[in-house]
Image (cartoon, rainbow, N blue to C red):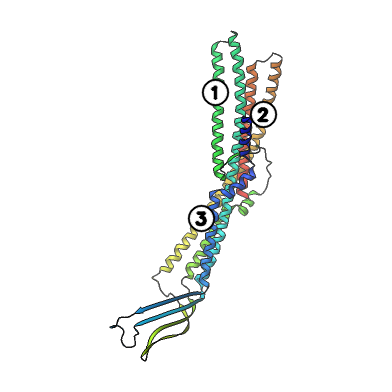
Amino acid sequence: MRSLFLLLVGFSLSLAITLQEAVDLALRNNVSTKLSLLDIQKAEEGIKRARAGILPQVSFSYTYTRLGGDLAFGFTPKNRHSYLFEVDQTLFNSAVFESLRLSKEQRELQSLIYEDVKAEVAFQTKQLFYALLYKREVVRLLEENVKYWEENYKQVEAKFKGGILPKVELMRAKAQWEGSKAELESAKADYQKSLEDFKRFIGYEGSVEPQGELKYVEYQERDYEGLLLEKNTSIKVSRKSLDVLQRAIEVQKAQYYPSLEAFATYQGSTAKVGNGEKMLDGYTFGVRLNYRIFDGFSREATIAQAKIDLLKQMESLRDVERSQRAELSKVLLDIKSLREQIRTAELNLEASKEALRLSTERYKYGIATQLEVLEAASNYNNALKNYYYLLYLYNTAIAKLERLTQ
């Protein structure tokens, strides 16, 4: 009863997770997506900072000064108070407006980067999930394999004790059994390590078990190159980076355009009037025109640097488009090849299954030996293992195709 209770508790604490649930968890918990979201927030704060340049700037200052007796002479008061309240408003400043546009472009860029990060996280989650499904099947097949070789060992041991087989056959049978157990333990360890990597990636701390099995997903012929150029997030990021650098050139140019500001102040200070001291105050209004006439050719150098960055990004965009096209071509070739390999594997699987059935029937009528049945079963399991491996590669290739074109 206690063992059954522990088993039920352990089962209840293990989360059976589907592929979509795993993707959703990864998108919420993966470090890359969290950091990308913070970058978006940072870009939004950059917009607020840039917008501050077109909003009124208000400042206030107050000063108190006490002068010694030797310094306070004439019209200078001994205790001097002064204050200044000032409001400045930008009327025209191309650099401020261009900086605001640049900040908005950077916000859009960070949003695209976030979409690209999500696409990559989703792909890696699928890849890890499919690998777990495959390795779990391998463990199951190896468990069956251990049972087969254990049965073979028992049969050989019985014949050895009966004097039918020599000791070397018994030793060989035991070595096969022990070897199958070692292979099973290795596969279990590999599965558990992959499970830990999967949990870390999706950000889940508890016990988890992938739900589902590897299946053949029908491939649909479409204009994938057109979808690549239209929807690929990596290409979108590279294109938007080009727009940002183009806007950065305009910001640098705008630094040297005239700017016009209006200002208003209300100020006061202590002064001697007659025999006493009085606070004198008043308003001032005005406009301020700024224009940088010459800066030692710094402007030309700064703009030239920005244009060079733009040229570099143009080359980077072309390289990204070429690399993504190459990835698309390779994954389409992989899918085509794997479809044919899966068809061949299905035929081999049917042949192995039929051979196992015939061996079992022959054994029932005393025509075949136990070893022949075990070898047929082992061949069937190996064919099944290869079939699952091809399904793993195929599903991963489909996921990669989705990553490139969605």
Q: Earlier in the sequence, mark 1 or mark 2?
A: 1
Which amino acid does the dot numbered 2 rest on?
Leu
Spatial separation of the CA atoms under disc 2 and disc 3: 50 Å
Q: Earlier in the sequence, mark 3 or mark 1?
A: 1
Residue pointed to by mark 1: 179
Label 1 secondary element:
helix
Q: Which part of the image, by quadrant, shows the N terminus? A: top right
Spatial separation of the CA atoms under disc 1 and disc 2: 24 Å
Q: Note whether 379 is above or below 53 in the view shown.
A: above
Spatial separation of the CA atoms under disc 3 and disc 1: 55 Å
Which amino acid does the dot numbered 3 rest on?
Glu
Label 2 secondary element:
helix
Which of the two marks, 2 or 3, is nearer to us in this view? 2
Q: Is residue 243 visible?
A: no
- Residue 349: mark in rendering: 2
Judge by depth and name the residue closer to the eye, 200 or 389: 200
Q: Is residue 64 visible?
A: yes
Residue 102 image point, x, y percent? 53, 64
Q: Note whether 243 is above or below 62 in the view shown.
A: above
Residue pointed to by mark 3: 315
Which of the two marks, 1 or 2, is nearer to us in this view? 1
Q: Earlier in the sequence, mark 2 or mark 3?
A: 3
Which amino acid does the dot numbered 1 rest on?
Gly
Asked which quadrant contains residue 171, the reply is top right
Horizontal relation, residue 169 to residue 18: left or right = left
Horizontal relation, residue 73 to residue 21: left or right = left
- Residue 35: mark in rendering: none
Residue 173 image point, x, y percent? 57, 17
Horizontal relation, residue 155 to residue 312: left or right = right
Label 3 secondary element:
helix
Residue at the bottom extreme, as displayed: 274
